[in-house]
Image: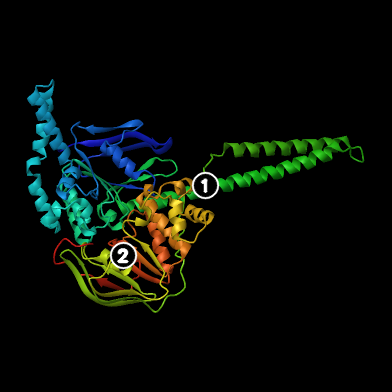
């Protein structure tokens, strides 16, 4: 389709009577590369669902021009199920399953002679042929081969996928999706260097429009051509053209101008108010003197005093009118601002962790033998492609999994703070957020509420079931516990996943001042540039492409 547009026209949406988005305007056409920016919870993912037609706006409209425009929201992770295999889940993620279902139903109606069945069948057949549903399985095999996903993994239940396989399946769904406009929510989460290269290549080749929610600064620098910034106070959107760096520069300039305008207004207002107050005081003193009869009975002098007082009163009124004529400039709104530090526990032993002939096995995957030690205060990166065993190594280190051979030991007095990829501490059972936090720390209820408020989690959020927190909220809550409880070994596995940009910058600042031991797993190139690592342990590419990752 050479010419098309997906248009949002003054779109508004609320949830539980609270405004989420107000009067959003945008237009997406061929080769559009639009990033939606804003802090966690501002409505970025909601906007994607509105554009995809999965939510209906309460005001305004989302138009597809022409009506047959294909818009697809691609979720980056398969839903975990013990009964649905990867191949079928890919068909659902790419919309192929829906097309097949519609074609089957239309065929059945046509065979039954239902009214209007011929038209429905013609539409369904046209969509079925255009999407090449019959050739989908072959394309799945090709995508799996390109991504190093073993053929046997395609027949696994999605609940049995390892971390590395989940990343590859999410990327395969993107490669297999055919749409005029593609909507992506955090597409770089958990992708290794090879996966990022595949994603970059797909974006460069894709002639359609792309709308992406991402906080990956390197990715945005490469691909964003325009930025829609959502304002957490007004809930409206501002469009910036010219790419990611141009957006940052223009936004900083606009913020500086806002501050300057407000400062100028306040200075003028305060100066006039001070002048008016002084003039009124002079008027009051003059009126007081005029009311008193001069000692010499000089009526001319008394009249002069009254005239002078009236003149001063006129000046005071003029000054007050000047204040009223000033164009009011509102103070620039300042939203919630994270100020994050890591509270350090007392120093641990000199040797924090030891790997002695460590071997990890999972199915056909083998990692090791690994011999190494991490010493107190070291800042160590753990690198390797998806599937090389990084998360499995962390599981063994923290006692969640047993080694097949050799040993892995933590030293004395090591206090671990872990931020894992899935933030699992907030996904177990039906406990409230407050229960999870007080159960994981020594904080009393009131202290826990106070700490969490600094991380943008208010009273209502603390009462919610922990599993209802968004990924960004889970990450902030985990970071808050680091600040509250004190740690001397930080284990961070893809810590920037789901964090907004201000929080990422605060995390970088906190790590800069943290003096304990750090073990960091990340593919965020800007984070790795900004966190000074002492060394990196690089795990080898697995011999077979179906390990834990």
On screen, residue 246 above or below 181: below
Q: Secondary structure at mark 1?
A: helix
Return the residue nearer the eye: 228 or 477.
477
Quarter of the picture holding the N terminus: top left
- Report the Cα–Cα distance between label 1 and label 2: 55 Å
Residue drawn where x is 60% and y is 37% of the image:
324
The extreme right residue here reads 296
The numbered mark, 1 or 2, whose residue comes first in the sequence reads 1
Return the residue nearer the eye: 245 or 456.
456
Percent position (x, y) of residue 21?
38, 38
Residue 262 visible, this orientation: yes
In screen coordinates, is 265 left or right of 35? right
- Disc 2 crowd rating (10 Å Cα; few below 14, some 14-19, many 20+) is few
Tag nearer the camera, 1 or 2: 2
- Disc 1 crowd rating (10 Å Cα; few below 14, some 14-19, many 20+) is some
- Which residue carries the number 1 mark? 262
Total number of numbered discs in the rendering: 2
In screen coordinates, is 515 left or right of 97? right
Quarter of the picture holding the C terminus: bottom left
Residue 249 visible, this orientation: no
Percent position (x, y) of residue 104?
11, 33
Percent position (x, y) of residue 306?
80, 36
Q: Secondary structure at mark 2?
A: loop
Q: Which mark is residue 291?
A: none
Q: Quadrant of residue 537?
A: bottom left
- Which residue carries the number 2 mark? 400
């Amino acid at each position: 389709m050479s010419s098309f547009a997906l248009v949002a026209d003054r779109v508004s949406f609320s949830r539980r009577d609270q405004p989420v988005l107000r009067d959003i305007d945008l237009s997406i056409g061929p080769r559009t590369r639009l990033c939606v920016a804003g802090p966690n919870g501002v409505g970025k993912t909601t906007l994607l669902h509105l554009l995809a037609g999965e939510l209906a706006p309460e005001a305004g409209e989302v138009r597809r021009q022409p009506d047959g425009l294909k818009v697809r929201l691609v979720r980056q992770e398969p839903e975990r199920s013990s009964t649905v295999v990867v191949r079928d889940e890919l068909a659902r993620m790419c919309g192929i399953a829906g097309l097949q279902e519609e074609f089957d139903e239309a065929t059945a109606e046509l065979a039954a002679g239902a009214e209007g069945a011929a038209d429905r069948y013609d539409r369904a057949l046209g969509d079925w042929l255009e999407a090449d549903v019959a050739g989908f399985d072959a394309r799945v095999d090709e995508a799996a081969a390109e991504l190093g996903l073993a053929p046997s993994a395609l027949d696994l239940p999605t609940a049995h996928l390892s971390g590395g396989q989940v990343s590859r399946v999410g990327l395969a769904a993107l490669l297999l999706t055919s749409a005029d406009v593609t909507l992506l929510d955090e597409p770089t989460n958990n992708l290794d260097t090879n996966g990022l290269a595949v994603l970059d290549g797909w974006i460069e080749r894709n002639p359609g429009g792309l709308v992406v929610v991402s906080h990956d600064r390197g990715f945005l620098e490469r691909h964003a051509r325009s930025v829609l910034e959502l304002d957490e106070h007004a809930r409206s959107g501002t469009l910036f053209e010219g790419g990611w760096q141009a957006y940052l520069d223009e936004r900083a300039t606009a913020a500086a101008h806002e501050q300057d305008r407000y400062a100028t207004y306040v200075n003028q207002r305060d100066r006039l108010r001070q002048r008016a107050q002084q003039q009124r005081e002079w008027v009051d003193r003059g009126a007081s003197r005029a009311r008193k009869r001069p000692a010499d009975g000089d009526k001319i002098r008394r009249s002069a005093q009254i005239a002078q007082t009236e003149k001063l009163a006129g000046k005071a009124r003029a000054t007050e009118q000047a204040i009223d004529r000033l164009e009011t400039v509102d103070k620039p709104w300042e939203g919630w601002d994270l100020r994050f530090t890591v509270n350090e526990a007392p120093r641990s032993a000199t040797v924090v962790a030891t790997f002695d002939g460590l071997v990890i096995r999972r199915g056909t995957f083998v990692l090791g033998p690994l011999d190494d030690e991490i010493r107190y205060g070291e800042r160590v990166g753990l690198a390797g492609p998806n599937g090389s065993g990084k998360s499995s190594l962390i599981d063994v280190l923290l006692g969640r999994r047993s080694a097949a051979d050799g040993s892995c030991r933590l030293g004395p007095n090591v206090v671990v703070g872990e931020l894992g990829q899935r933030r699992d501490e907030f996904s177990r059972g039906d406990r409230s957020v407050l229960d999870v936090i007080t159960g994981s720390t020594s904080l009393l209820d009131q202290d826990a509420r106070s700490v969490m408020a600094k991380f943008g989690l208010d009273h209502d959020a603390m009462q919610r079931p922990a599993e209802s927190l968004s990924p960004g909220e889970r990450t902030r809550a985990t970071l808050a516990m680091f600040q509250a409880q004190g740690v001397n070994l930080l284990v961070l596995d893809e810590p920037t996943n789901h964090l907004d940009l201000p929080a990422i910058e605060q995390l970088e600042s906190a790590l800069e001042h943290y003096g304990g031991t750090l073990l960091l797993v990340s593919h965020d190139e800007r984070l790795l540039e900004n966190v000074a690592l002492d060394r990196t342990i690089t795990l080898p590419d697995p011999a077979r492409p179906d390990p834990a990752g």
